[in-house]
Amino acid sequence: QVQLVESGGGLVQAGGSLRLSCAASGSIFSISAMAWYRQAPGKQRELVAGITHGGSTNYADSLKGRFTISRDNAKNMVYLQMNSLKPEDTAVYYCHAEVLPAGLAWGDYWGQGTQVTVSS
């Protein structure tokens, strides 16, 4: 069974920084793309940033320059460094991964989410 567990969320003042982490665990043979999504109250879940196994990244246009995604393939982890945070960044942040579990087919897996609240 594959699990994704996020950490690092919390309350921060506008202009501050947070670093989110997501650890994938279980019987994992391989992980392809990993990504961070977020969902604010009353809004749809949206892509924040994605990263391939080889390290190629993509970002939501509105977040370029403030957020940085990275990963550690050896540890099955993905990170999101968030700088110059704004109140509109307040949301639940979810980790997503395309995982090949041992003995199974490729599948999409989600973490439970971590709350990020930015106060003005």
Image: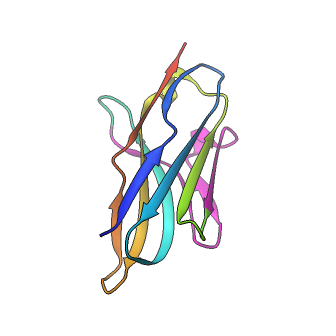
Q: Is residue 111 above or below residue 109?
A: above
Residue, x 42% and y 69% (percent of image)? 98
Q: Position of residue 68 (x, y in %)?
A: 65, 47
Residue, x 35% and y 61% (percent of image)? 3
Q: Is residue 51 magenta?
A: yes
Q: How many marks?
A: 0
Give whichever of 75, 84 is nearer the camera. Answer: 75
Give whichever of 16, 44 is nearer the camera. Answer: 16
Q: Position of residue 106 (x, y in %)?
A: 35, 78
Q: Is residue 64 above or below residue 102?
A: above
First to last magenta residue range? 44-71
Horizontal placement of 75 versus 6: left or right? right
Q: Position of residue 84 (x, y in %)?
A: 66, 28
Q: Quadrant of residue 24?
A: bottom left
Q: Tell me, what colour scheme is on the image? A: rainbow
Horizontal placement of 118 versus 42: left or right? right
Residue, x 29% and y 29% (percent of image)? 42
Q: Quadrant of residue 46?
A: top left
